[in-house]
Image (tube, rainbow, N blue to C red):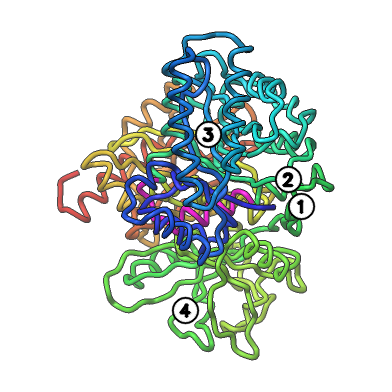
């Protein structure tokens, strides 16, 4: 598969965009005209630089408003088009994107369009160039891919083909199945974009909210299946208009883009294994059996270990070659704490260990999806957990199942046996699982993070939700497997409050228990500082669910929150913030599916007050 990316997807100068595309591993780029116009480098210099970087220049774009015009206007349009062909010769590229007319179209006649398209093809042929004609979803007369293709077929010129753009097709709700029956020789170019479902005009949706494949709601797997069935074998390119992408770090965005293409190619190769696109096929994702451990780093060691002790964890040991790392255990739940010294630095979630059947294969899939291996020295008698960096710089570890099938092959490195439990008394083990991990990301990085974990671990995205907070709406979405769940939150940033909250928005570990009351009572006896829940919440809770006064009194005394669905109940409490991290303990009753997000506004408001008080000294 020949991968490509439009320079409009990336931030920075044209030179920086080319560098980032090459470093990420793209084969080529589309040159967006404005990027060239504002560049201080000549077309010849851009051509030379691309060659040095090993990039092909695949498409010059866009050329607007060529067809559906009166003859005098069309002759002037040909003059404009010829100047672009001359520029393309200097760039060393031979294909131009021509969009259906939006602004100047006055002649609604397919015969006129066919004649004009053929004449444009004749001009292109004189320069050794090719025209990819694309139907914009908001084109005045031509706005469907089938109409554009029909015009190309009728024009019947070897230098004229069509460009298929997933956004322009899927945003209209068009059925892409007709692509499979197209003549592949008439499909000159393929542009891919995903997008979240939004209620707005197609034009602003297109210009500001496109995302990479797998990060939105379009069925791109079906779309690519139809393209592969057609026999198309040209570049597979990304064309993303997104305000946040244009502000994000260019190298990270480029890697995110290529990861999305690899993920989509892998999905398509499963459906159409003999495609001439030669789609790369990854090793199957291994569904994690569970979390083996969670790793924290802190400059407030006493604060963190005190909270763990209050929740019922005990110190299992210190790492044999990395004494700054401690293992805290309770049953099969293991928390690794890295002590960075008495810096006062915020406690942060820095690593996740997942149990997989084949750790080496899982790590190979991750690196194929553009994850960078973590350089790490492993002692002779120490387990290689194959860590890779996640997009935010934390680490993902792949842990083999071990003899017991529950992971923890690394346990002897902390000085105790693999089958040693966390306590001599089984009754002391009240926390028995990691229910989910809740990550927080800047708004422009949340979709990237979701795609990373879903593609690497084979998790499936759930329906997103928007939760009100004192600083604005928080976008939350879960990505789930049978035994592992990760939620990703994007805090608001567009105000003073939003900027503060985005900077300090906490991540957390949600522990599972069969008796949340017993955990809470033990923790309170040991002095745990819980997140205080206002009395107004419990008054509302009683009204919403008709709960018994005695039950309300019981949960209120322990700051326990409650949610209920038709299939079950969710009882949970939160610790006070520990820097940028906190703990949640949850008991699931029945077949409840979810994370207690009905209570998120209460948590977010309480944490917002606590964080402002701690960081700025502002009264709650």
Tell me residue 46's x, y (percent): 43, 57
Q: Earlier in the sequence, mark 2 or mark 4?
A: 2
Name the residue beneath numbered marker 1. Answer: 278
Characterize the magenta stretch by its predominant secondary structure: helix
Determine contact: label 1, label 2, CB under 8 Å: yes
Q: Residue at x 25, y 48 (%)?
A: 500
Of all residues, the one furthest to the bottom in this rendering is: 380
**Disc 3 versus disc 1: nearer the observer:** 1
Residue 325 circle label: 4
Determine contact: label 3, label 1, CB under 8 Å: no
Position of 96 with respect to 102 (left or right) is: right
Magenta extent: 246-261
Name the residue beneath numbered marker 3. Answer: 195
Name the residue beneath numbered marker 2. Answer: 233
Q: Earlier in the sequence, mark 3 or mark 4?
A: 3
Q: Quadrant of residue 285?
A: bottom right
Inter-mark Cα distance, 3 to 4: 42 Å
Q: Nearer the viewer, residue 568 or 261?
A: 261
Q: Residue at x 68, y 77 (%)?
A: 418
Position of 245 with respect to 383 (left or right) is: left
Can residue 557 be seen here? no
Q: What element carries label 2?
A: loop
Q: Earlier in the sequence, mark 2 or mark 3?
A: 3
Q: Which of marks 1 and 2 is nearer the N terminus?
A: 2
Q: Nearer the viewer, residue 157 or 282?
A: 157
Determine contact: label 1, label 4, CB under 8 Å: no
Q: Earlier in the sequence, mark 1 or mark 4?
A: 1
Q: Is mark 4 on a helix, strand or loop?
A: strand
The answer to whether 150 is drawn above or below residue 572 in the figure is above
Q: Quadrant of residue 174?
A: top right
């Amino acid at each position: 598969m020949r991968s490509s990316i439009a320079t409009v997807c990336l931030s920075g100068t044209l030179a920086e965009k080319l560098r980032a595309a090459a470093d990420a591993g793209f084969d080529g780029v589309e040159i967006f005209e404005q990027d060239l116009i504002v560049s201080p480098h000549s077309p010849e210099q851009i051509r030379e630089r691309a060659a040095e970087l090993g990039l092909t220049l695949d498409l010059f774009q866009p050329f607007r408003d060529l067809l559906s015009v009166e003859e005098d206007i069309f002759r002037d349009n040909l003059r404009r088009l010829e100047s672009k062909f001359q520029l393309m010769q200097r760039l060393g590229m031979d294909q131009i994107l021509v969009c259906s007319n939006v602004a100047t179209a006055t002649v609604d006649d397919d015969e006129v369009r066919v004649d004009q398209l053929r004449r444009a093809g004749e001009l292109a042929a004189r320069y050794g160039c090719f025209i990819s004609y694309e139907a914009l979803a908001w084109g005045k007369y031509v706005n469907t891919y089938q109409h554009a293709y029909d015009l190309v077929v009728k024009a019947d010129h070897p230098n004229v083909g069509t460009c298929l753009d997933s956004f322009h097709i899927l945003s209209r709700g068009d059925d892409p199945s007709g692509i499979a029956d197209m003549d592949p020789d008439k499909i000159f170019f393929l542009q891919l974009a995903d997008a979240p479902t939004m209620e707005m005009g197609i034009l602003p949706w297109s210009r500001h909210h496109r995302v990479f494949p797998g990060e939105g709601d379009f069925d791109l797997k079906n779309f690519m299946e139809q393209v592969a069935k057609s026999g198309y074998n040209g570049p597979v390119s990304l064309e993303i208009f997104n305000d946040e992408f244009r502000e994000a770090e260019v190298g990270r965005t480029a890697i995110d883009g290529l990861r999305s293409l690899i993920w989509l190619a892998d999905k398509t190769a499963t459906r159409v294994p003999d495609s001439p696109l030669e789609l790369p096929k990854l090793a199957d994702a291994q569904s994690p059996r569970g979390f083996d451990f969670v790793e924290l780093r802190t400059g407030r060691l006493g604060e963190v270990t005190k909270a763990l002790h209050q929740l019922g964890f005990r110190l299992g040991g210190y790492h044999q070659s990395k004494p700054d790392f401690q293992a805290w255990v309770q049953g099969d739940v293991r928390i690794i704490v890295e002590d960075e010294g008495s810096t006062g630095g915020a406690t942060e979630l820095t690593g996740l260990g997942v149990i997989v059947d084949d750790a080496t294969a899982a790590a190979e899939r991750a690196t194929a999806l553009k994850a960078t291996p973590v350089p790490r020295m492993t002692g002779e008698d120490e387990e290689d957990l194959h860590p890779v960096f996640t997009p935010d710089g934390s680490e993902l570890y792949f842990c083999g199942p071990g003899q017991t099938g529950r992971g923890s092959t690394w346990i002897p490195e902390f000085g105790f046996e693999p089958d040693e439990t966390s306590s001599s008394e089984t009754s002391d083990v009240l926390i028995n699982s990691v229910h989910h991990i809740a990550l927080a990301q800047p708004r422009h990085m949340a979709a990237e993070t979701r795609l990373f974990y879903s593609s690497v671990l084979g998790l499936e995205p759930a329906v997103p939700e928007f939760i009100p907070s004192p600083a604005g709406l928080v976008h939350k979405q879960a990505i789930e497997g049978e035994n592992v769940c990760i939620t990703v939150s994007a805090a608001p940033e567009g105000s003073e409050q939003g900027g503060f909250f985005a900077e300090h928005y906490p991540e957390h570990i949600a522990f599972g228990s069969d008796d949340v009351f017993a955990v809470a009572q033990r923790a309170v006896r040991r002095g745990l500082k819980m997140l205080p829940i206002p009395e107004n919440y419990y008054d509302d809770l009683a009204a919403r669910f008709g709960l018994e006064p005695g039950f309300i009194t019981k949960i209120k005394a322990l700051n326990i929150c409650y949610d209920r669905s038709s299939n079950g109940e969710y009882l949970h409490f939160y610790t006070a913030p520990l820097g940028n991290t906190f703990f949640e303990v949850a008991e699931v009753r029945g077949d409840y599916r979810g994370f207690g997000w009905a209570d998120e506004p209460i948590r977010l408001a309480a944490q917002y007050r606590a964080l402002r008080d701690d960081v700025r000294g502002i009264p709650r």
